[in-house]
Image: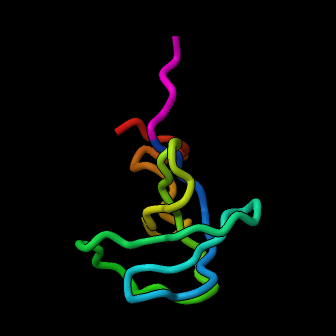
Amino acid sequence: MERIPDYIETHVTVRELLSERTATVELPNGLRLLGYLRRDHRGAPLAVGQNLRARLNVADFARAELRGTPEAETSPAGEKIVASTD
C-alpha cells in the first residue's frame, strides 16, 4: 500500500509582507495563507510578488514553510520534487 506523504511542495506568490520572516502568500488556486521563513534561512528577503516554493503539511493548509525559488524545485538527480514524507 502506498504511503500518504506528510508534506506537499507547491509554488506560492507573496501578496503582503507581515514581518521580515512572514507574509501572506497565495496558492495557485487562489487560497491565501500564512507563509514563513525558518529562523536559519540565509536567502534573499521576502518581497511582494515573489514566487517561491512552499512546503505544506497535508493536515494543515493554514500555513506554509517558504523554501526557496521555483528554479530550485529539482533534486540533484534532476527529478522533480513533488512530495516529501520527512
Q: Tell which of 77 and 82 is nearer to you.
A: 82
**Residue farthest toward the top in the current orientation of the protein:** 1
Residue 5 sits inside the magenta stretch: yes
20 up-or-down from 37: above or below: below
Q: How is the image coloured?
A: rainbow
Q: Tell which of 69 and 54 is nearer to you.
A: 54
Residue 25 sits inside the magenta stretch: no
**Residue farthest toward the right in the current orientation of the protein:** 29
Residue 78 on image: x %, y %: 49, 47
Q: Tell which of 71 and 39 is nearer to you.
A: 39
Q: Residue at x 50, y 62 (%)?
A: 63
Q: Residue at x 52, y 46 (%)?
A: 8
Chief secondary structure of the magenta span?
A: loop
Residue 11 on image: x %, y %: 60, 62
67 up-or-down from 75: above or below: below
| Quarter holding residue 13 | bottom right
In screen coordinates, is 17 left or right of 77?
right
Whether residue 81 is visible, yes or no, is no
Q: Residue at x 43, y 63 (%)?
A: 65
Q: Residue at x 40, y 36 (%)?
A: 85
In screen coordinates, is 35 left or right of 50?
left
| Quarter holding residue 30 | bottom right
Whether residue 86 is visible, yes or no, is yes
Quadrant in the picture for the C terminus: top left
Q: Which residues are magenta?
A: 1-6
The number of discs equals 0
